[in-house]
Image (tube, rainbow, N blue to C red):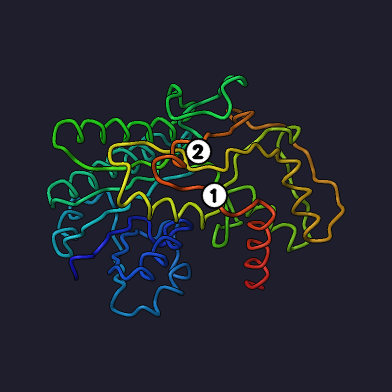
């Protein structure tokens, strides 16, 4: 591989595959490391047109042989997106969650350090990192206390702590992006995934949508294309920092539903079920630090991003 080789763990996933596309377009040789437990070959379909620029490795990040993969390709940058990302599964099986998100991440970090990787960019979780905030503190800045309320959030926070130690002890260069509620094409509408993709899948199939609780809980939705742009900018600036990547806008689940229903021409009321334990009531992250240091800001308005999701779901027939 070339001196401009990058590794993307979780590169066959929703966000990771979009990042892979953009990196290839920028001329990088890209090595996807993915065990395909949640990612899919279909997500990499567009990337295959780049031929030998793309290499796909079926590899578990918890496997000790990961360092050999890194040795074989000598990456300049590593983008670490592989994770067990189901919050409910993290509560049901905390050992699995920790094995992937903590031990697997530490394996990626240590492999990167040993190979002299120039920088690691880590996909942190802005939605779970800060816990349930006080309303007066919204939108939350990166200086807010880290108080995760799920095992998933704890595991993602632990990786930030490891990265800080590696920075202080080894001079290891990293950037962590605390992602808000990312949505866009390729997000799986089946099973545990983002509410946007679930609504889109149901509305396209003319099935009822379910809202848990009263629907007035809020989320900070940011389009996947904007998130990928933040990853690219993090390659060259902001070393050692954590950045919220968000829209800095609260949108209630009710508002989201009716925005999407309108685009589908649907008028049916959603079905309301009891709220789920541990679900945050409100979530909104300040992106002012990313604007200032990364010169990044979201470019997709919610309506525009939702239209792209609906177009993608329609193309899947």
Q: For the point 81% across and 55% down, which residue is it?
A: 262
Residue at image mark 2:
287
User: Considering the numbered disc 1 on the image, is that residue within a helix, a strand or a loop?
Assistant: loop
**What separation in Å lies between label 2 and label 1 (alpha carbons)?**
9 Å
x and y percent of residue 66 in the render? 20, 54
Q: Residues within 10 Å of mark 1 (few under 14, many from 20)?
A: some
x and y percent of residue 21 in the render? 42, 67
Residue at image mark 1:
298
Q: For the point 39% across and 77% down, which residue is it?
A: 48
> Would residue 91 be found to the left or right of residue 114 on screen?
right
Q: Are marks 2 and 1 in contact (CB under 8 Å)?
A: yes
User: Considering the numbered disc 2 on the image, is that residue within a helix, a strand or a loop?
Assistant: loop
> Would residue 51 be found to the left or right of residue 248 on screen?
left
Instruction: Reply above or below: 184 against 240.
Output: below
Question: In the orientation shown, which residue stands out farthest toward the right?
Answer: 267
Name the residue nearer the viewer: 38 or 223: 223
Instruction: Reply above or below: 312 against 210.
Output: below
Q: For the point 29% across and 68% down, which residue is it?
A: 28
Mark carried by residue 93: none
Instruction: Reply above or below: 46 against 289.
Output: below
Instruction: Reply above or below: 89 against 308.
Output: above
Q: Residues within 10 Å of mark 2 (few under 14, many from 20)?
A: many
């Amino acid at each position: 591989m070339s001196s401009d080789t990058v590794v993307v763990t979780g590169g066959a996933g929703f966000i990771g595959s979009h990042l892979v596309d953009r990196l290839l377009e920028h001329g990088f040789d890209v090595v996807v490391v993915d065990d395909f437990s949640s990612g899919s070959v279909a997500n990499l379909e567009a990337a295959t047109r780049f031929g030998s620029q793309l290499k796909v490795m079926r590899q578990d990040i918890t496997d000790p042989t990961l360092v050999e993969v890194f040795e074989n390709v000598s990456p300049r940058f590593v983008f670490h997106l592989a994770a067990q990302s189901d919050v409910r599964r993290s509560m049901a099986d905390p050992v699995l969650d920790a094995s992937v998100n903590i031990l697997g991440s530490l394996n990626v970090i240590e492999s990167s350090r040993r190979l002299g990787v120039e920088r690691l960019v880590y996909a942190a979780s802005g939605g779970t990192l800060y816990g349930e905030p006080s309303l007066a503190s919204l939108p939350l800045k990166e200086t807010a206390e880290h108080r995760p309320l799920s095992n998933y959030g704890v595991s993602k926070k632990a990786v930030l702590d490891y990265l800080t130690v590696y920075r202080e002890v080894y001079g290891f260069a990293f950037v962590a992006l605390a992602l808000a509620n990312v949505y866009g094409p390729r997000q799986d509408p089946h099973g545990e995934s983002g509410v946007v993709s679930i609504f889109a899948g149901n509305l396209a199939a003319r099935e009822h949508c379910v809202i848990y609780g009263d629907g007035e809980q809020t989320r900070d939705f940011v389009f996947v294309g904007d998130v990928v742009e933040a990853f690219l900018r993090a390659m060259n600036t902001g070393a050692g920092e954590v950045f919220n990547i968000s829209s800095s806008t609260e949108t209630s689940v009710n508002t989201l539903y009716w925005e999407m229903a309108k685009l589908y021409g649907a008028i049916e009321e959603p079905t309301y079920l009891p709220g789920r334990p541990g679900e945050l009531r409100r979530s909104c992250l300040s992106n002012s630090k990313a604007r200032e240091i990364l010169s990044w800001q979201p470019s997709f308005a919610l309506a525009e991003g939702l239209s792209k999701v609906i177009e993608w779901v329609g193309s899947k027939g």
